[in-house]
Amino acid sequence: MVRVQVPATTANMGPGFDTLGMALKLYNIVEMEEAGLNLYIDVEGDGAERIPRGRSNIVYVAAARVFQITGYEPRGLRIKITNNIPLARGLGSSASAIIGGLVAANILSGNKLTENELLNLAANIEGHPDNVAPALLGGIVVTVKDDDEIQFVKIEPPAKLRCVVAIPDFPLQTKAAREVLPQAVTISDAVFNISRTALLVAALMKQDFNLLTVAMDDKIHQPYRSNLVPGMKKVFAAARLAGARGVALSGAGPTLIAFCDENTGFIAKVMKETFSQSGLQVKVLELEPNPVGAVALEVMK
Ligand code: HSE
């Protein structure tokens, strides 16, 4: 039996749309073993009732891709998924499922695929690399898609970085949150985001928190998505006033994430109260960046 733990992730980090992502200390577990005669999928935890148990299950889809490429034929397959990452909230639940399926199936089939191959497969299934890369590798990952190949650099999260996430009580599918985006942006908006993405990576590497407010601003996706999350702009402003160094929509949302170095309890309270003024109930969590990606906790043949 193979047991893989995969972290939650926050993608974009403000300006780094489809490019930057960071792993967080919150985990889904995927267990996989060759047993029975057919496919059996069991799901527990967040959103369990909404997750398909058949061959359209994303953990299975990812695993099947590995078996197909490696030519490995499992004798029956039992998959158990334990979800702690809230579903469709912008914290990388689908990326964790994909990575869990790929890593577990790769172990079952004799570790034939490299980390690079797994990352490219994952990005291909997900459609963009910014969640799957930190889910697999941990830390903060800068990703670039070049001719269908993912180039990446992992950087260590600043030691003092803490995150507060405010998770609204409604799901938002990434597809819907991408449909509100324009097909083209102006050159000045492109420069706005390029400069901030570069500044953000440099600031994180130098552990310079003073730059985060400016560096995490964005003009190419958040303004278009703000209508999908009632109170988003107010919560951004309130979190900054409460001491957050930078605030962003986590991935495609609806979760908001504040980057902090202190006062996380107060910032969490302010984000929750400000959301409730807009009629939205949120769950707030204080999460640390996770330097480690997917890990196999148990491997028994
Ligand atoms: N970069 C992606 C987006 C992340 O913002 O649409 C969501 O999965």
Image: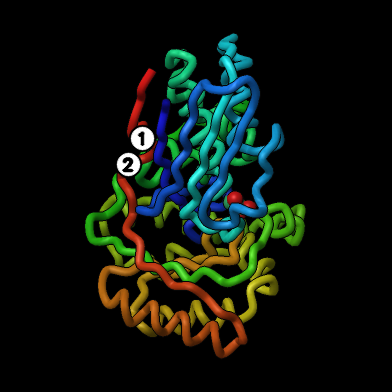
Instruction: Give the residue type at disc 2.
Output: Val
Q: Quadrant of the C terminus?
A: top left
Q: Quadrant of the N terminus?
A: top left
Instruction: Give the residue type at disc 1.
Output: Val
- Rate crowding at label 2 as few (under 14), some (14 to 19) or many (20 or more) other CA atoms within 10 Å: some
- Check residue 236 in the rendering and tell me which mark sits there, or answer none: none
What x and y, as percent, mark residue 214? 43, 68
**The quadrant where residue 249 appears:** bottom right
What residue is shown at x 65% (from left), y 23% (from top)?
A: 38
What x and y, as percent, mark residue 292? 32, 41
Could you say which is closer to the camera, residue 279 or residue 184? 279
Could you say which is closer to the camera, residue 195 or residue 252? 252
Could you say which is closer to the camera, residue 213 or residue 100? 100
Q: In the image, is residue 286 above or below residue 185?
A: below
Residue 186 visible from this viewpoint: no
Task: Give the Cα distance between marks 1 and 2.
Answer: 8 Å
Q: Which residue is mark 2?
A: 292
Q: Which residue is mark 1?
A: 295
Q: In the image, is residue 153 above or below residue 189?
A: above
Could you say which is closer to the camera, residue 49 or residue 147? 49
Instruction: Give the residue furthest to the front.
Output: 36
What residue is shown at x 62% (from left), y 39% (from top)?
A: 126
What residue is shown at x 36% (from left), y 22% (from top)?
A: 300
Q: Are marks 1 and 2 in contact (CB under 8 Å)?
A: yes
